């Protein structure tokens, strides 16, 4: 394992435990088994490290999503695969949704940079397929972009508002994670049942 991989793995662990605000560079260095000077040599500050960790994780998710969007599967199967892939990914990287929301407010240029990245999830083919399946009578008439927004909202929101969801429902971390596992299929089936003819 390279030093950078050790840093990324350690940073993910610390960010997951402490969140961005609570994480300290010394803790990340200790977790990686390197000294703080080496960590600062690789990444000048916590913000740059978090952005690098985020882009590394995003670089793993985006190809999975694009493979789903561009596959020959039906729209219904793509919805099932998307919710399963996205929720599985965020369960492994639970700090990312809060980070994106924080960065949208504090560092919008960074958020826009990854949304403009050529490897970002690109739903163009899926939008065309939704339009075709509507024309073929498979799906009820619906604005494809509204459908995509519904799918994304239902998968992203519980993670982005995790503390509120846990507090409102009075559930533990373990119960929350169990609910998220259930949502891998329940979201997809709920959406599919609402749009199929």
Image (cartoon, rainbow, N blue to C red):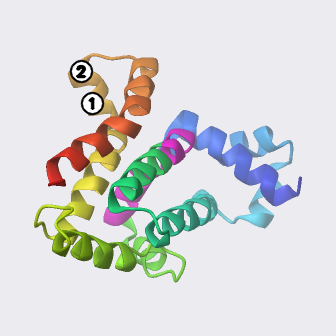
Residue 128 location, quadrant:
bottom left
Residues marked 2 and 1 touching at CB (< 8 Å): yes
Q: Marks 2 and 1, how far apart in space?
A: 6 Å
Res 82 label = none
Q: Residue 61: x percent and y percent?
A: 55, 60
Say which of 175 and 33 sits in front. Answer: 175
Left-right relation of 106 to 29: left
Q: Which residue is mark 2?
A: 169
Left-right relation of 80 to 138: right
Residue 184 location, quadrant:
top left
Q: Which residue is mark 1?
A: 165
Segment tinted magenta in the rendering:
88-105
Say which of 43 and 142 sits in front. Answer: 142
Left-right relation of 154 to 22: left
Residue 192 visible within the image: yes
Q: Residue at x 67, y 47 (%)?
A: 11
Which quadrant is the C terminus positioned in? bottom left
Check the image and report above or below for 68 versus 174.
below
Q: Residues within 10 Å of mark 2 (few under 14, many from 20)?
A: few
Which type of secondary structure does the marked residue at label 2 adopt? helix
Say which of 120 and 127 sits in front. Answer: 127
């Amino acid at each position: 394992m390279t030093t950078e991989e050790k840093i990324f793995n350690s940073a993910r662990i610390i960010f997951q435990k402490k969140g961005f605000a609570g994480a300290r560079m010394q803790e990340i260095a200790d977790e990686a088994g390197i000294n703080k000077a080496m960590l600062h040599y690789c990444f000048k500050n916590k913000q740059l490290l978090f952005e690098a960790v985020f882009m590394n994780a995003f670089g793993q998710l985006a190809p999975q999503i694009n493979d789903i969007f561009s596959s020959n599967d039906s729209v219904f199967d793509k919805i099932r695969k998307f919710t399963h892939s996205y929720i599985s990914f965020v369960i492994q990287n639970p700090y990312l949704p809060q980070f994106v929301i924080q960065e949208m407010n504090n560092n919008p240029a960074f958020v826009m940079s990854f949304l403009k990245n050529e490897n970002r999830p690109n739903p163009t083919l899926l939008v065309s397929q939704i339009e075709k399946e509507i024309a073929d009578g498979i799906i009820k008439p619906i604005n494809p972009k509204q459908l995509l927004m519904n799918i994304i909202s239902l998968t992203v929101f519980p993670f982005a508002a995790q503390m509120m969801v846990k507090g409102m429902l009075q559930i533990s971390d373990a119960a929350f994670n169990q609910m998220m596992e259930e949502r891998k299929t329940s979201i997809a089936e709920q959406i599919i049942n609402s749009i199929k003819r």
